[in-house]
Image: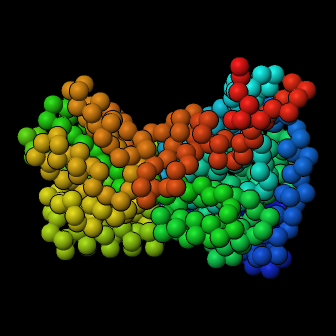
């Protein structure tokens, strides 16, 4: 167990309230991973004040110099990869091979940032008038509030903080209360790499105090949030009142389409990884499998056998495939959806109950669950469950499969397995999702490409790659007239 403190203006400090909360291992609830300050508005105000004070000097540092710090961050993370990954498994639960991937994504994001500072382009465009130059540049905005989820405790905080800082902003981050330790370690790494005091501040606490405080504070210029669509609507509403910039990465109800001509073995591997990786606790998780009628029964038989062979247990054991859910309340929520599925008339073919064998009785494990004969209108086919529950839907043909795929309020990720090049390319065109995979599962985003979705999945911004830097900067258009005369655009014309 470790005693964590807020990081404010480069110092590790307790909350002014003296209150604390515990973070426990979801695979073994008796194990306390860390104790954290339960912060108040007073703590938050100090962090925002420090970030505001640090902003002018930080933004004045050239982009390439800030990039060098990102390179040092990557180097430190490489050295601490196993340490961070094991900590992540202890506080979040997912298996160690996945937490290593989560940490690697943070490393890759830092490496990407380390090059972006030397090539973050503006546009140079011709003027309609003589002896006049026109171009654009991007400038930082000020102090950002970053609110991160519990399912990717390193990757998503780095997705937000690295572009935010490299762009010249300062930040106050509120980690998820289920997984705060990794963000605490990230703060220490940034300090070690040379980020000046006050540029990156960590304040632990609940959404009602720290989250709401960030939304309503006049010195916060923007909010970057990843989480549920319901909370995202609330954040968008509050930010809209003060015209804060707001980047929302929200829920998903992702579908994998399996056509009759698909490589079924490959499609099976894809749905297993997509549905049960991270115990289904991903916004991109495959929660629907849409199978063309000619191969429906055969694929279900293959799927059931493979799902029942998945090994459940503590994520630190390399032999296990599926770890626990993050909390007891999350397990209760998952089970409530299983009961809803049964009531709706879907057929449960495997799973559907907590897993309590052996030492798993000490944690929040749940059996990987598959419903078949699901209809597109059922709640389990429409609502984000965020757990190891897969709904299998039969489609008569390709046309109906695409209609089912698009038939939800979400639009994050989609997948189609087919050997038909025409159908694959048509699916890319027709899928109402921000991410499309062909012959690959709905999970597996890479840090140098845009990430985000349509419809209720977000508000149009894209994290990852070059587009993340667009979130955290303002476009400035520059006109330089060296003609020595007054020239009037749209009025004077070139003769």
Determine whether, in the image, residue 113 is placed left or right of residue 412.
right
Residue 20 image point, x, y percent: 72, 75
**Residue at the image position 32 percent from the left and 73 percent from the top:** 336
Determine whether, in the image, residue 464 is placed left or right of residue 171.
left
**Res. 86 visible in picture:** no
Picture quarter with the N terminus: bottom right
Picture quarter with the C terminus: top right
Which of 144 and 182 lies nearest the eye of the viewer? 144
- Residue 237, by quadrant, is bottom right
- Residue 52, by quadrant, is bottom right
**Residue at the image position 77 percent from the left and 35 percent from the top:** 488
Residue 238 image point, x, y percent: 62, 71
Tag count in the figure? 0
Which of 255 and 270 lies nearest the eye of the viewer? 255
Which of 354 and 57 lies nearest the eye of the viewer? 57
Determine whether, in the image, residue 192 is placed left or right of residue 57.
left
**Res. 384 visible in picture:** yes
**Residue at the image position 91 percent from the left and 26 percent from the top:** 484
Residue 41 image point, x, y percent: 77, 76
**Residue at the image position 48 percent from the left and 39 percent from the top:** 445
Compared with residue 307, is residue 383 higher up or lower down, i.e. above or below? below
Determine whether, in the image, residue 371 is placed left or right of residue 103.
left
Residue 299 image point, x, y percent: 16, 42
Query: Residue at the front extreme?
Result: 495
């Amino acid at each position: 167990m470790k005693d964590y403190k807020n990081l404010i203006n480069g110092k590790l400090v307790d909350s002014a309230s003296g209150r604390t909360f515990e973070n426990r291992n979801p695979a073994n609830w008796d194990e306390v991973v860390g104790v954290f300050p339960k912060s108040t508005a007073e703590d938050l105000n100090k962090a925002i004040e420090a970030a505001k004070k640090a902003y002018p000097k930080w933004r004045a540092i050239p982009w390439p110099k800030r990039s060098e710090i990102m390179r040092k961050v990557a180097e430190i993370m490489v050295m601490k990869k196993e340490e961070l990954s094991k900590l992540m498994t202890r506080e979040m639960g997912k298996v160690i091979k996945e937490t290593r991937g989560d940490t690697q994504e943070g490393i890759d994001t830092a490496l990407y940032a380390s090059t972006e500072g030397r090539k973050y382009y503006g546009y140079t465009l011709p003027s309609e008038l003589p002896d006049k130059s026109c171009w654009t540049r991007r400038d930082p905005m000020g102090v950002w509030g970053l609110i991160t989820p519990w399912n990717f405790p390193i990757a998503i905080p780095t997705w937000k903080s690295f572009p935010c800082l490299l762009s010249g902003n300062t930040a106050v981050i509120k980690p998820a209360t289920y997984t705060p330790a990794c963000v605490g370690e990230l703060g220490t790494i940034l300090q070690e790499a040379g980020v000046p005091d006050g540029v990156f501040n960590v304040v632990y606490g609940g959404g009602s105090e720290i989250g709401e405080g960030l939304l309503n504070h006049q010195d916060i210029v923007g909010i970057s949030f990843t989480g549920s669509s319901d909370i995202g609507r609330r954040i968008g509403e509050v930010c809209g009142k003060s015209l804060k910039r707001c980047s929302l990465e929200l829920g998903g109800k992702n579908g994998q389409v399996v056509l009759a001509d698909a490589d079924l073995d490959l499609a099976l591997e894809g749905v297993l990884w997509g549905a049960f990786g991270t115990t289904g606790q991903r916004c991109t998780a495959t929660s629907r499998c849409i199978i063309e009628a000619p191969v429906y029964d055969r694929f279900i038989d293959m799927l059931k056998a493979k799902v029942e062979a998945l090994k459940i247990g503590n994520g630190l054991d390399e032999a296990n495939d599926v770890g626990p859910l993050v909390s007891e309340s999350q397990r209760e929520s998952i089970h409530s959806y299983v009961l809803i599925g049964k009531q709706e008339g879907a057929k449960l073919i495997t799973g559907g109950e907590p897993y309590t064998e052996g030492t798993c009785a000490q944690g929040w494990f749940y059996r990987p669950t598959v419903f078949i004969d699901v209809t597109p209108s059922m709640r389990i086919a429409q609502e984000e469950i965020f757990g190891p529950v897969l709904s299998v839907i039969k489609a008569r043909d390709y046309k109906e499969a695409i209609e089912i795929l698009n038939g939800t309020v979400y639009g994050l990720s989609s997948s189609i397995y087919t050997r038909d090049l025409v159908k694959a390319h048509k699916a890319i065109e027709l899928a109402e999702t921000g991410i499309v995979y062909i012959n690959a599962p709905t999970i597996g985003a890479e840090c140098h490409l845009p990430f985000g979705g349509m419809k209720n999945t977000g508000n149009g911004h894209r994290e990852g790659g070059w587009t993340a830097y667009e979130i955290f900067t303002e476009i400035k258009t520059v006109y330089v007239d060296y003609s020595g005369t007054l020239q009037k655009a749209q009025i004077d014309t070139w003769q």
